[in-house]
Amino acid sequence: MEPRNPDDLEALREASDILGLDALLTGDERATRDRVRAFVDAEIRPHIADWFDRAHFPAELAPAFGELGVLGMTLKGYGCPGRSAVEYGLAALELEAGDSGLRTFVSVQGSLAMGSIHRWGSEAQKQEWLPRMAAGEVIGAFGLTEPTAGSDPSSMRTFARRDGGDWVLDGAKRWIGLATIAQLVVVWAQTDEGVRGFVVPADAPGFAATVLEPKGSMRASIQTGLTFDGVRLPASAVLPEARGLRGPFAALNEARYGIVWGALGAARDSYESALRHALRREQFGRPIAGFQLTQQKLVDMVVELQKGALLALQIGRAKDAGTLRPEQVSLGKLNNVREAIAIAREARTILGGDGVLLENPPIRHAANLESVRTYEGTDEVHTLILGQHLTGIGAFR
């Protein structure tokens, strides 16, 4: 048997799909995947090492993401694409094969900010914001996490009080994506009526957003800290249908779903980089792909990639069928991110010293995935969600 050609990526991908998972996708699903993959190849791959190195988020691509149809991808009406959950998952996978930061932008904009307005907002709020957000003309952020309330949002201290017909917002948020370039932030706050959501214009007096830097992860993305100092909001700023933590938790589950797929993109890109390098790199008179230890590493990666893809597809089909449960999303997020980090790290070892150069993606993916592993629920949180499901006993406190 002749060694595989490292320059024939499609043949390498076909060989790596040992279970024939591509055949489980519909024609529309494959078309969506291929369209997003082509966008990533043309608009992200040539620049991502430089963006990561300079800690630059390409906000100028927002309208292109809108034209691609990935903003609020599963939402229906109001100019939103209205695509299936599996199509969105495949798009998230391809975007994160480019970079976690770019997939995170799509998640924050579509699943968190747009999703909250679409599900809980008034008709006027939906009409005002969703069409422009779907087009990438307006950028939104999602303010839930606080300096002292990360995994426990019920302990948030940000508070909104009534003052006549208005609301007055005070407090702080931390690790909020996109807020310094956003035109609006969906903010969750305690009130005398329980947790409520508010659409806060980024130019509101008393609102401030500050970039959190320097970072060793998610450098081609923007994370911020927010402060609210007597921010006065009209009654029309409230998301009228959201009461209690079910509002933000519903949005988080949407974002977690995208991560189940997205992490596989970072893992696949790391694996493919390692495989192609191993086929090219010669030591001791032969390509290192011909050594048993290298083959074991490559096989272990593909085993987890195939298992992770089956898991993501099963979860996606359940979501499209309307039967998806939160513990299923937790299982997918916990497993796929954990395995993606292991794959990125192992891929780096095959690349040897060159593996620490940003021209090779595994080190960047490994660094990014440390953030992905932390946000939208840490490993520990998802473990306890699953433990509660199995035992019926909550162990969070």
Image: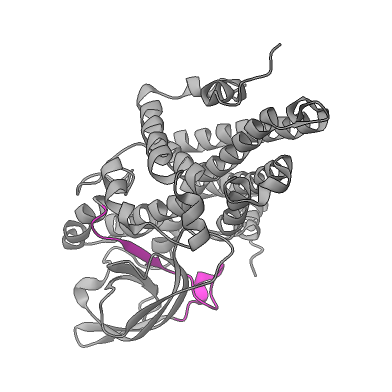
Q: Is residue 14 left or right of residue 25?
A: right
* Residue found at x 35% / y 56%: 109
Q: Is residue 163 above or below residue 216?
A: below
Is residue 395 inside the magenta stretch?
Answer: no
Total numbered labels: 0
Q: Measuring 19% from the left and 83% from the top, which residue is drawn there?
A: 165
Q: Is residue 137 magenta?
A: yes
Q: Quadrant of the C terminus?
A: bottom right
As drawn, 84 above or below 236: above
Does residue 132 sit above or below 325 in this rendering?
below
Instruction: Using residue 153 as the reference point, say whether residue 195 is left or right of it.
Output: left
Which of the pair 218/125 is nearer the observer? Answer: 218
Compared with residue 143, is residue 271 higher up or lower down, i.e. above or below?
above
Q: Position of residue 323 (x, y in %)?
A: 45, 39
- Tell me which corner region of the image, top left, top right, bottom left or bottom right, holds residue 233: bottom left
Q: Nearer the viewer, residue 80 or 293?
A: 293
The N terminus lies in quadrant: top right
Magenta stretch bounds? 136-157
Q: Nearer the viewer, residue 163 or 178?
A: 178
Overall secondary structure of the magenta stretch?
Answer: loop
Q: Residue furthest front?
A: 285
Residue at 34% across, 58% down: 59
Q: How is the image coloured?
A: one colour
**Quarter where residue 370 is shown:** bottom right
Q: Position of residue 75 (x, y in %)?
A: 30, 46
Residue 377 lies, in percent from the top left, at: 56, 59
Across and down, in percent, residue 278 comes to 70, 32
Residue 393 seen anywhere in this rendered image of the structure: no
**Drawn side of residue 376 relative to residue 102, left or right:** right
Using the rendered view, name the quadrant where residue 294 is placed. Answer: top right
Residue 26 visible in image: yes
